[in-house]
Amino acid sequence: MLKGTANRIKSYQIPLVYFIDTLLTICEYEHIVIYKENKMDNHEKNEIYRLHAEFCQTLSDANRLLIISELSRGELSVNELVSRLGLRQSNVSKHLAVMRERGLVSTRREGAAIYYSLSDKRISEAIRLLMEAQRDLIEKKRVLSNGINEFALGK
């Protein structure tokens, strides 16, 4: 079923919802139904995972995560982001361009100003979930480390 959609996927015309929901769910878009992974051939699975990796790679920069954090509170201009984050305007603009190209942010022009917003609120929710998972993993490691230290000290 995915055959013939690769060009649309590569050009990011499928909504961001697709990237977030695809792994284990059914996604419908323009009469295209993408079945659960076990129904896809290896080429299709590889393409899906490549797209997921590209999406995650977009999130793998600390400044982009900061930008997403600010945009999760609402629409902002580049100047407002620069002021809030203490980053250089060129740096913020570069990150926003990448995020826009990959479908994470949307824009709205008002006069000379361009306002940015998250294209899907689930982006910030996904990051929040990842941070919670990371916090829990760190806590488990801390507990394990404390247990090993106590064992080594004979407590």
Image (spheres, rainbow, N blue to C red):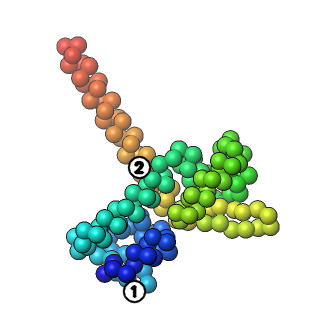
Q: Earlier in the sequence, mark 2 or mark 1?
A: 1
Give 155 or 87, whichever is nearer the viewer.
87
- Crowding around mark 2 (Cα neighbors within 10 Å: few <14, some 14 to 19, many 20+) is few
Residue linked to disc 2? 130
In the picture as drawn, the residue positioned furthest to the right comes out as 111
The amino acid at mark 1 is His
Q: Residue at x 48, y 52 (%)?
A: 59
The quarter of the rendered structure image containing the N terminus is: bottom left
Question: SS class of the residue under badge 1?
Answer: loop
Q: Provide residue 10's location: percent of width, then percent of height.
A: 45, 70
**In this rendering, the label closer to the viewer, 2 or 1:** 1
* Quadrant housing residue 98: bottom right
Give 126 or 51, whichever is nearer the viewer.
51
Decide if residue 102 is on the left or right side of residue 113.
left
Q: Provide residue 16's location: percent of width, then percent of height.
A: 48, 68
Decide if residue 4 is on the left or right side of residue 81.
left
The amino acid at mark 2 is Leu
Q: Residue at x 53, y 49 (%)?
A: 65
Residue linked to disc 1? 31
Q: Is residue 139 visible to the viewer in this orientation of the structure?
A: yes
Residue 101 — which label?
none
Is 42 situated above or below 66? below
Do residues under tags 2 and 1 come within 8 Å of each other at their CB atoms?
Answer: no
Q: Provide residue 85's location: percent of width, then percent of height.
A: 65, 44
Is 126 situated above or below 42? above
